[in-house]
Structures are given as C-alpha cells and as structure tokens.
C-alpha cells in the first residue's frame, strides 16, 4: 500500500538544532509544509554529502515556507557530536531528528529491521499531515536536494492551483496542464 495521501502517524522524537535539544511530534508538523529525509546513520559516507546538500538549499526551502528535517535511528546526542566534528554537518541548520526507538522509521516504512537503520526515504508532508511525495532509495544511492526542491515547488503549485497538474520536468514559472476531455490524446 502506498503512503501517498495518507495521514502521518503519531510520533514523538528528540531533535538537535543550532546547539539545542527539543521535542518534535506529529503535531509539530501540522499547519505547514515539511520535508523529512531519512538516512542510515551518522558518521558514515553518503549521508554527510546528502545532509550538506540539503543544508546548502535550506534557505530556499524556508523561503517557500517548508521546514526540513533529517532523521536517522541515531540519538539526538549523536547528531550533536557529528555536528560538532564534521565540516559538512556543521553547515546543517535544520532540525536533526533522533529515532533510537525506530518508531519514526517504522511509521514511514523505511526501517531495515535486521540492521536497525533507515533507508534513504524522502517525504513531503502537507499542512494537514498528508504525505504528498514519497521517495525511497537503496542506501548506496544519494539524493539531490535541487530535485527535491523542484518537487516541493510542484506540490506547492498544485496545492494552490486546483485543477492544474505539473508535467514532467516542470520548473517554477513553466506551463502546467489542466486535465480535461479536450486534452485526451493530444499530449
């Protein structure tokens, strides 16, 4: 069963951001757009490249009103230690969610049970708590934050323009489609 358009399940985790620890719950996400990017583990190899890439695009997400969260099955304490020791992770200004109980990874169907680690899962959640984008990669395949940003812009456009859809490779400002009987067989 797909997670698309399903309500996020209740959760409560500890986060690290800008030198502070705090709690994040499913209720924290309500009322705004959010991205959660799961990754396998702190102090690894592909993970810091992805989190650094997200950090370099974080201001663009914020300008769109979208909060970004990274999440792994490490603790919030491990996130702080990684942030304090890695040049790439020092750039991270968004909240880093600790999920040592694996509840969050289970909720989003990205937990590798036998390893206690998460797959590379990316989720875009709308203000009502519905999952609008779900992308899951094998852990050897890194993601591209600019492609995620394009998908976020498309989702925001579709949400604010009922009856319109964004075609493949759509970029902000490009033409959209209005599905109708007149378009059938003409694309």
Image: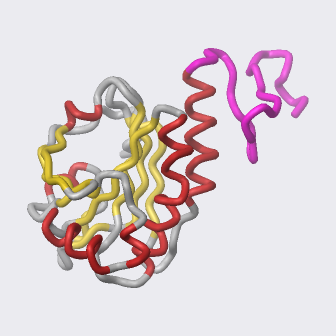
Residue shown at 22% from the left, 58% from the top: 19
Q: Residue 3: image x %, image y %?
A: 37, 43
Residue 65 vs 151, above or below: the answer is: above
Tell me the quarter of the picture where residue 35 sits: top left
Residue shown at 85% from the left, 16% from the top: 182
Q: Is residue 178 magenta?
A: yes
- Looking at the rendered image, the quarter that the C terminus falls into is top right
Q: Residue 166: image x %, image y %?
A: 70, 33
Left or right relative to 96: residue 88: right
Q: Which range is magenta?
A: 160-187
Residue nearer the viewer, 33 or 168 = 33
In this rendering, does residue 106 appear at all? no
Q: Residue 117: image x %, image y %?
A: 24, 72
Q: Is residue 181 magenta?
A: yes
Tell me the quarter of the picture where residue 76 sits: bottom left
Magenta-highlighted stretch: main secondary structure? loop
Residue 109 vs 184, above or below: the answer is: below
Tell me the quarter of the picture where residue 165 sits: top right
Residue 51 vs 93, above or below: the answer is: below
In this picture the colour scheme is: secondary structure
Residue shown at 47% from the left, 59% from the top: 55
Residue 68 vs 112, above or below: the answer is: above
In this rendering, does residue 162 appear at all? yes
Q: Residue 156: image x %, image y %?
A: 56, 29
Left or right relative to 52: residue 70: left
Residue shown at 32% from the left, 30% from the top: 129
Residue nearer the viewer, 5 or 84 = 84
């Amino acid at each position: 069963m797909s997670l698309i358009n399903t309500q996020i399940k209740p959760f409560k985790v500890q986060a690290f951001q800008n030198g502070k620890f705090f709690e994040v719950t499913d209720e924290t996400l309500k009322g705004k757009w959010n991205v959660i990017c799961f990754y396998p583990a702190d102090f690894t190899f592909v993970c810091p490249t992805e989190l650094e890439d997200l950090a370099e695009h974080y201001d663009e997400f914020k300008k769109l009103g979208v909060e970004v969260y990274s999440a792994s099955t490490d603790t919030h304490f491990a996130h702080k230690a990684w942030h304090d020791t890695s040049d790439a992770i020092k750039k991270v200004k968004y909240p880093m969610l600790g999920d040592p109980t694996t509840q969050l990874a289970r909720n989003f169907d990205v937990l590798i049970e036998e390893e206690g680690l998460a797959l590379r899962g990316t989720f875009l959640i709308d203000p009502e708590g519905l999952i609008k984008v779900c992308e899951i990669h094998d852990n050897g395949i890194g993601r591209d934050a600019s492609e995620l940003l394009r998908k976020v812009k498309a989702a925001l456009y579709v949400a604010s323009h009922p009856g319109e859809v964004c075609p493949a490779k759509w970029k902000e400002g490009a033409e959209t489609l209005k599905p109708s009987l007149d378009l059938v067989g003409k694309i």
